[in-house]
Amino acid sequence: MSVVRGTYRVQVQPAFDLRAAAGLADYLRDLGVTQLYSAPLLQSTPGSQHGYDVVDPSHVNTELGGAEALAELTAALRAHGLGLVVDIVPNHVGVAVPSANPAWWDVLKLGAASEYARWFDIDWSRGRILVPVLGSDDDVSALTVEDGELRYYEHRYPIAPGTGAGRNGESVSAQEVHDRQHYQLVDWRRGDGEITYRRFFAIADLAGIRVEDPTVFNATHGEILRWYAEGGLDGLRVDHPDGLRDPGEYLQRLHMGAPEAWLVVEKIAEPGEELPDWPIDGLTGYDALGEVGTLFVDPAGEAAFTALDTELTGVATDYPGLLYGSKKDVATGMLLAELRRLARLAGAPGESAVPEVEAALAELLAAFPVYRSYLPFGLDHLLDALESARERRPDLGPALDALEPRLTDPDDQLAVRFQQTSGAVMAKGAEDTAFYRWTRFIALNEVGGDPLRFGGTVDDFHQAQRSRQASWPRGMTTLSTHDTKRSEDVRARLAVLSELPDEWADAVRRWRELAPVPDGSIAHLLYQTVAGTYPISADRLKGAVEKSAREARTVTSWNDPDAEFESALNAAVDALLASSEVTAFAERITPYGWTNALGQKLVQLTMPGIPDTYQGTELWDNSLVDPDNRRPVDFDARRKLLARLDDGWLPPVDTEGAAKLLVTSRALRLRRERPELFESYAPVAVTGPAAAHAVAFDRGGAIAVATRLPVGLERRGGWGDTVLALPDGEWKDELTGAVYSTGADGPAGLVDVLSRYPVALLTQV
């Protein structure tokens, strides 16, 4: 096994399969990473572009090349001194195509008698398995029987033994055959309120599985653990552990199966939230993303952005109230089936134990301050939610009093399932609803972030990194992922707006005349998105803002699209992209965005933790929410630019983005080749008139220096006499090769250290 020091995320998919990934090995070695970090590799739904919908965990996805291609990838990586980290999905499997999932097919065919029934979290007390797939309930008339299967257009379903014909072998209608099955096909709209199996969030095509059952764990993890045992894996990234019955027990079992693997989990922690004592190396970087991002946002712009939001929406938004409302909307809407299942658990068979129990549970889910508890760990969060619910709804006091002893008991099935549900409510209510409804400043509306925290100080950042170094020195850090709503460079350019709040407000007012949108909040999201991504194609922009508007569900939605509104939104996109004023504004802020982008990239790559680079982001990247961030990457262009850098070229900071590739490759190489320089953390003092515009820290011999708030720096006339308190000696910038002497010659002036680039990576000669 190889030690993980830096990863590169590749969205392996049918269009870029395992053999294509193997072809990156030499490039990734030259870039400086130590591991390729792959999207899920087990057999997934046919045609899947992401791999998070595994249908058969027993083998490598044949659409990616199968086991032979995985062996070729592993061999290519090892030949270049690299290893492999793989994303795994323990919470759910794909069931959109039942025939592709042998376990699900068998359960549909045989019901509770299936040997695979134990795999799935099905409420058998509800009778038949509800499958929400029909265009309407009347569509049962469109069912047919073909080749011994029940068909609904392209959808195929099994027929239980002895149910495909009449008692004497005579033919019967397809609808009659359907009525005899262990499953019931119903209107797709009924899923949110009536589905009978645990889902991934509100996606009926992803059915929850019971990895707490050792048989299920072994069946779903045997292939992955075999790769590890044979030396093919260096690390695992665990997707969505909060959906599991007992994440801690699961992670302990996984650790026992892969004891030396680097293990990180996609647990979304709220700012300041503590984690249980799990056998992991850390999280997957969203917390780091938030810490880095706020460092480059100017807190002084908050009041103006709040005023603009009020002007656009006509409402002074109370974000905590909006978040509560969004979570309540989710709990009583798209996750109503889960809420009702909780209510049934809370009551006696056939009836609720206390009046208004469903309403009380909804209040608790909406008030829960973090994603979930892990009782008894996190009991304080539950008590806080109870207190908040009682204050908000005193009429529910008796119901809440009755629920409290059960919800605080770690062994009570109600408490277990409540914890699984609260994470889904937070995920859909916060990051997939509230973050799209409150668009005051969308650079902050990212997974793991806090839209209320409008910028931070250098001291705040240093304190966070001291804590990270002490507690999670090997957790992943990142700036972009397959789940970020906006790439790192989009957010870096948006951060410029925080320094130009009045200029931005004037631009928005003009753009509203130029490209009106019938909803002020969605309008502001669109205008910010244009400013952060321009130039961008109309198709890409329309796809992203339409998805954002539908996720918000305030005017249009996935379940009930508003064609008139969406037409107006598309027209606004066309008008903005055709406007010379929009072009001029984007061109004005772009250079400052480059400064922020280089700064946050160097900070992320050198701060405590294991840095991940999302595919393609070693150059400028203006990606938006998926599927936009899974677009093909031009690796040939990156190879050529990296070769030029290695020939001694020092690129300008311009549209080509080679300066970011320089920063990325030099920081990653230093971490790989001299890890001893990154074993501690200490702030490096910056003094002088422009000290607030720099952040610097020493990782134990490697010193990172980055510019922040570049508009303000320019306004004050540059660095002037601002100096960096380097230890005495000679220091080399790994980016440029320049050497600076301190001691007898005095401290290092930032006007010199940052003369070529807005960042520097210093090591002692």
Image (cartoon, rainbow, N blue to C red):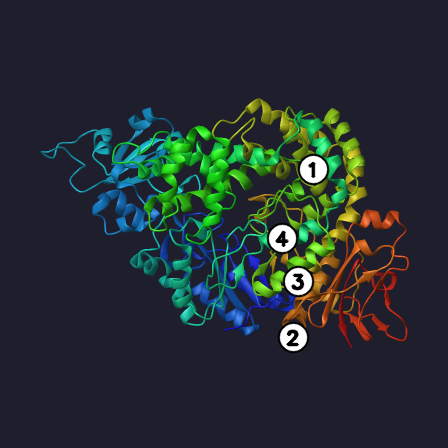
191 relative to 109 in the view: left or right: right
Q: Nearer the viewer, residue 44 or 557?
A: 557
**Whether residue 411 is visible:** yes
Q: Are marks 2 and 1 in contact (CB under 8 Å)?
A: no
Per the model, the C-alpha gap separating discs 3 and 2 is 14 Å
Q: Which residue is mark 2?
A: 676
Gap between marks 2 and 4 measured at Cα: 24 Å
Mark 1 sits on what residue? 528
Estimate the x, y position of residue 436 in percent, counting from the top left.
Answer: 59, 36
Which of pointers 4 and 1 indicates the residue nearer the eye? 4
Q: Please, what is the three-letter code of the amino acid marked with disc 2?
A: Glu
Q: Is residue 469 left or right of residue 695?
A: left
Q: Position of residue 754 (x, y in %)?
A: 83, 61
Give the residue type that dot 1 points to: Gln
688 vs 583, nearest the viewer: 688
Q: Which disc, if any, is residue 289?
A: 4
The tag earlier along the polypeptide, 4 or 3, is 4
Q: Residue at x 33, y 36 (%)?
A: 131
The Cα atoms of the two marked residues, 4 and 3, are separated by 11 Å
Foreground disc of the pair 2, 1 = 2
In the image, which disc is placed on residue 607?
3
Residue drawn at the location 81% of the way across and 42% of the way down: 588
Left or right placement of residue 517 versus residue 20 in this view? right
> At label 4, which amino acid type do we have?
Leu
